[in-house]
Amino acid sequence: MYIRKTARAALAAALFCAALMLVASAPGAASAQEVLTMKQAVERALTDNPSMRAARHDLLGAEEGRKSARGDFLPSATVTYGYTVQDHTKPSRDVDTTDAKYFSTSLNLHQDLFTGFATLSTYQRAELTRQSTGLALNQNELTVIGTVQQNFLALLKAREDVRSAEDSVARLEEQLKVTTAFYEVGLKPRLDVLQAEVDLATAQESLLQAKNDVDTQVARLNTLLDLDLHANVDYQGALEYAPCTLTLDEAVNSALAARPDLQIARKSVEIAAKDKKIVDSAFYPKLGADLDWSSMGTDPDVAGSDRTSTEYSEWSASVGVSWTFFEWGKTYYASKQADEQIKSLLETEMSTRQEALYEVKANHLAVGKAAESIKVSRKALEAARESYRMAVARYQAQVGTNTDVLDAQERLTLAEAGLTSALADYQIALSKLYVSIGRKNEALVIN
């Protein structure tokens, strides 16, 4: 009886596990795989990448700073309210005229009429800061585009390396079979088998490394797109070649007109000029108008008392000028310091411009070099394939050596890797070129 119950329990458990496996393997049981092209990946990163969100918050903050500076043009209002206790009332002859305990309130409206251009310059500086922050957002977008594209291309290269490594392993496995067969019938020495086994093991190790590179690049792209590291995403694309028709002069002109870092450098000079105006405002007098009202009383409503039933509130209007005309050269030297800051930023702008032009030319040359490398690598691959075919044929006809075959196989693998690298380098150089000229090319289309 016990054996029967145990058997039934085991059967039920097996049926339950089988049901779970069927449910897990059913369509829709696993998370659907998301497919992203390069353009879609870039657009996703521009929306979800944390650095992009941070840059957008910076821009919103700069806009709020501009609005805050705009408020300085409007009057300010200050209200006070308090309760005072004195040690005694204040008499006038034989009559007490004030209370020893009383509530008081006051209102002041102040309007700056002239601040030595400080208020205007502060607002203009805030506006320039907002514009500079917007340019920084554009710069961050270009950086994210370039980073995503280059990692996307690295993933495509890693996949091609896997395919090439798999082909290499397949060729070496076939060569090992042929070598082993020759050895078993006494036509080839044991050394040939050992050489084939060593080369096969090396190729298998390269295949493992290539597969690991694919997984690493997928994880990197998931991170850039703010996805989970293990997100099920299929990044689709191919390493292709299309001639780039963009001339160096066109690239330079585009960079000078569109690169955000060059515009940021110019804005920095303008901001420094506004800072100098703010410093120089201390040389001028300040003009302002005030409207004041006050009231007092023994009750919280500050509406007088038995002793002061009238004249308990008053108002006044005034216009005043203040001028601090001597501070032992403090403002003078601060102004000179601001002058030097402007000169420094002008030199920095020039340096940024020179570096940008160098970067454009270097990337343009890299595109041309990679294009030539593709042509050379394709010819080398054709020759390597023919060399391998001939080496295998000679070995099987007993007129060639195993070493010839293994050497030809290695050259073929290197030629395949060379073409893959050349294609990847070309597109990566294109990505860097477009970023360096300030042009957003999400899909990396040749135009």
Image (spheres, helix red, strand yellow):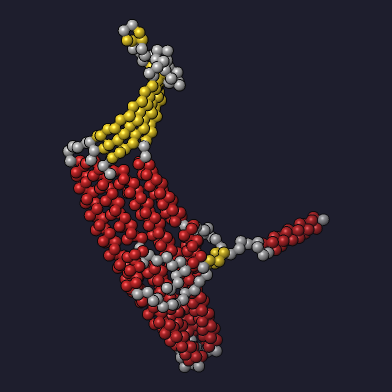
Q: 220 or 172, which lies in front?
A: 220
Q: In this rendering, does residue 215 appear at all?
A: no
Residue 105 in the image: above or below residue 386: above
Residue at the right extreme of this rendering: 1
Task: Point out the residue furthest to the left here.
Answer: 328
Percent of width and height locating residue 99: 38, 14
Q: Quadrant of residue 353?
A: bottom left
Residue 257 is situated, as x and y percent measured from the top left of the image, at: 34, 64
**Of residues 187 and 126, which is closer to you in this image?**
126
Visible residue check, residue 429: yes
Frontmost residue, 235 versus 447: 447
Please count the marks in the image.
0
Q: Residue at x 48, y 91 (%)?
A: 394
Q: The C terminus lies in which quarter of the figure?
A: bottom left
Q: Quadrant of the N terminus?
A: bottom right
Question: Which quadrant of the figure has residue 135?
Answer: bottom left
Whether residue 18 is situated above or below residue 318 in the rendered picture: below
Q: Residue at x 21, y 51 (%)?
A: 340
- Locate residue 345, reporting x and y percent: 26, 55
The quadrant where residue 296 appears? top left
| 223 vs 92, nearest the viewer | 92
Instruction: List x then y, in percent, for residue 22.
Output: 70, 63
| 342, above or below 217, in the image | above
| Lateral position of residue 59 relative to residue 26, left or right | left
Residue located 27% across and 36% down the image = 287
Image height of 203 relative to 28, above or below: below
Residue for point 30% across, 46% down: 121
